[in-house]
Amino acid sequence: MFALVDCNNFYASCERVFNPNLNGKPVAILSNNDGCIIARSDEAKNLGLPMGAPIFKWENFCKTNNIYVLSSNYPLYGDMSSRVMSILKQFTPDVEVYSIDESFLQFKGFENYNLNDYGQQIRQRVLKWTGIPTCVGIATTKGLSKVANKIARKFPKQTKGTYVIDTEDKRIKALKWLKIEDVWGIGRQLSKRLKAKGCKTALDFANLPEDWIKSNFSVIEARLHRDLNGIPTLTLEEYDQAKKVIATTRSFDYTYSDLSYIKERVATFAVTCAEKLRKQHSSCHTIIVFLKSNKHKKEQAQHSQSRAVHLPYATNSSLIISNTAVNAVTKIFKKGIEYKKAGVMITGFVPTNNYQLNIFEKENPKHLPLMQTIDQINLKYHTNKIKLASQDLERTWKMRQERLSPRYTTNINDIIKVK
């Protein structure tokens, strides 16, 4: 059996744990640079505040409806997420962290357990230890556990936040209730194709012939099809599985035409990519840098370009990756353009301890121990104490966060004081 544990209104719930005055009130969380709405409490949804709404257009709406609008506090959300996930691992060793607020659990050898009661225990412990409300969906496959979770979320009074699909009748009833566009893994375009075929519900999709699914869709849809029919096909994925591409991209707080500022941002992005690369014990061969103007300002000159650089040898050195990225963005940059976003991506990974050497060019052997020392120091102090000279020594990200709540759990100066 599989379970999907999903934190309800996670970003808003994190804020409510430390500010109980927000309980029962409409809450909205903004994206980077306080741009768009990326998370809403149920109260805000019921008022009609749409996801992705630009705050400058909906500011009056939020004020009129007394919606509390907050900047995204990622250090707080990330820390609260790790606390929730650590609690889930107490219930089973088989856990896949699917996103910041969702995890799949697999129950092996739980045949004699009452899984509905077990799901309630999970909810109660997470709520008691972290203050985060959750819903639990349990079924014979990952796909069906996602459906069960939606039912638990939709009907909290009837299910008490936990729902188990453990019979054929429950499976059919659940799939008949779920609309095709709400099925996990069915996107907007795919749902249009399926509706044209006559599929209006998840049950319609599950009843399609397997051979037709295989010939008309990808292997991903074929696996989902089998999962919804109660045939376990989608397995737990390793959370620590090495990535094939690492990217760090950010929108600037404002638009900039200053090359020195953009070079500093790109250098910081590149260093972050290199740190992630070393954590998974990999080195890269390719570095991709892009730079974009603000496409929403049609009256301004537009420019968007990327550049890929292939290195003669594999590296995970912040010095080399940063220097290469800065050189690339310098060639992309055009004078007179107001730039809004930049990013660095690295790929072409090989294991750091096993890759092909180049007879003519190689990395400076001093880089490896230097990077190890920097990582150890930064890990010890839980912050980027040591940076490259090309980086801003004061801040890692420069974002507009005018409505930011305190970092209650990650900054000693923001810890709540009890008087």
Image: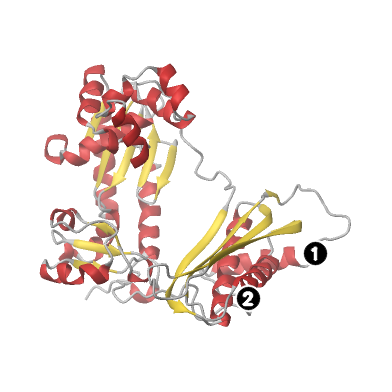
Q: CA distance from mark 2 to mark 1?
A: 18 Å
Task: In the rendered structure, find residue 1 and report the number of the disc placed on it.
Answer: none
Task: In the rendered structure, find residue 388 and report the number of the disc placed on it.
Answer: 2
Toward the right, the furthest residue is 359
Estimate the x, y position of residue 58 in percent, counting from the top left. Answer: 21, 67
- Tag 2: amino acid: Leu
Quadrant where the C terminus lies?
bottom left
SS at mark 1 in the image: loop
| Residue 251 sits above or below residue 277 on the image | below
| Residue 134 sits above or below residue 395 on the image | above
In the image: residue 211, left or right of residue 3 = right
Q: Is residue 187 visible?
A: no
Residue at x-position 15% and y-position 40%: 156
| Residue 77 sits above or below residue 403 on the image | above
Mark nearer the N terminus (2 vs 1): 1
Crowding at dot 1, Cα within 10 Å, few <14 / some 14-19 / many 20+, comes out as few
Estimate the x, y position of residue 168 in percent, counting from the top left. Answer: 26, 17
Q: Is residue 246 visible?
A: yes
Q: Which residue is mark 1?
A: 365
Estimate the x, y position of residue 123 in percent, counting from the top left. Answer: 25, 43
Which quadrant holds residue 260? Answer: bottom right
Residue at x-position 74% and y-position 59%: 311
- Tag 1: amino acid: Pro
Which quadrant holds residue 180? Answer: top left
Q: Nearer the viewer, residue 324 or 22?
A: 324
Which quadrant holds residue 131? Answer: bottom left
Chosen colour scheme? secondary structure
In the image: residue 410, left or right of residue 389 = left
In the image: residue 221, left or right of residue 124 = right
Q: Nearer the viewer, residue 163 or 398?
A: 398
Q: Nearer the viewer, residue 240 or 28?
A: 28
